[in-house]
Image (cartoon, helix red, strand yellow):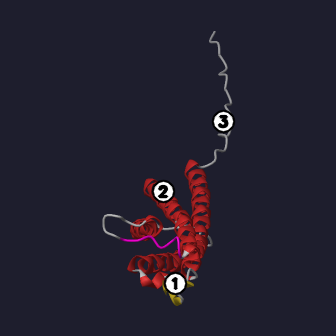
Amino acid sequence: MASINPSHSTLSVESPAPASVPARDYKFSAGMGAAKNHVMIDVVLRVMLFATSLVAVIVMVTSKQTKMIPIAPGLALPMAANFNQSPAFIYYVVALSVACLYSIITGLLSVLTLVKPSGRSTKMLFHFVILDVLLLGIMASAIGAAGAVGYIGFKGNDHTQWNKICNVFSTFCGHIAGSIAVSVLPSVALLLLVWVSVFALTKNIARS
């Protein structure tokens, strides 16, 4: 007698794969958040650059002082000390004025990139790095030139017979010293801007 073995059928149900967050979208959103933070830091530093450069310029251009200098017994003549009597101080004022204008233009460009979903482009960051470094070099040379002339005004130079003038024009020299001291801050702001722009540039290149 033939025996029939019934076949046992099995029913397999595949469980749905757990939903996963696309890694590419997550990295893109995280990268955009970091880019926005870089732009905010950039804007703050450019506002600092503008404010400190403006203060240094104002202190310098208001340094004029007039005093009566005796040239003979019973005879004194008015003599004025002003920043425009020194080419180094004129160069200093021009350099810081350029920094003020530059900070306004680049600050507005940075603010405009906040409303763009893509943030700052690699090309813009590259231009920012080049211009920031160029302006940093100009400001460093201007501050160095103004500081050298100011030092001679304070101390004089016995070897070249350059007499000091700050014992006579104390208010003028006080303005000069204050302006040069304040001008260190925009230089620091520019240095930080270069670092921030280079860091953001490397991130942009890595994402592309």
Residue bearing mark 2: 195
| Residue 66, quarter of the rendered image | bottom right
Instruction: Determine which of the numbered discs, if any, sits on residue 14 in the image.
Output: 3
Residue furthest out toward the top: 1
In this view, the residue farthest toward the left is 160
The secondary structure making up most of the magenta span is loop
Q: Residue furthest front?
A: 73
Q: Nearer the viewer, residue 177 or 95?
A: 177
State the quadrant of the C terminus: bottom left
The residue tagged with tag 1: helix, strand or loop?
Answer: strand
| Numbered range of the magenta stretch | 162-168
Q: Amino acid at mark 1?
A: Ile
Q: Position of residue 117 (x, y in %)?
A: 59, 68
Pair 2/3: label in front: 2
Badge 1 crowding class, 10 Å Cα cut-off, few under 14, some 14 to 19, many 20 or more, is few
The answer to the question of whether label 1 and label 2 lie on touching residues, with beta carbons closer than 8 A, is: no
How crowded pointer 3 is (Cα within 10 Å; few <14, some 14-19, many 20+) is rated as: few
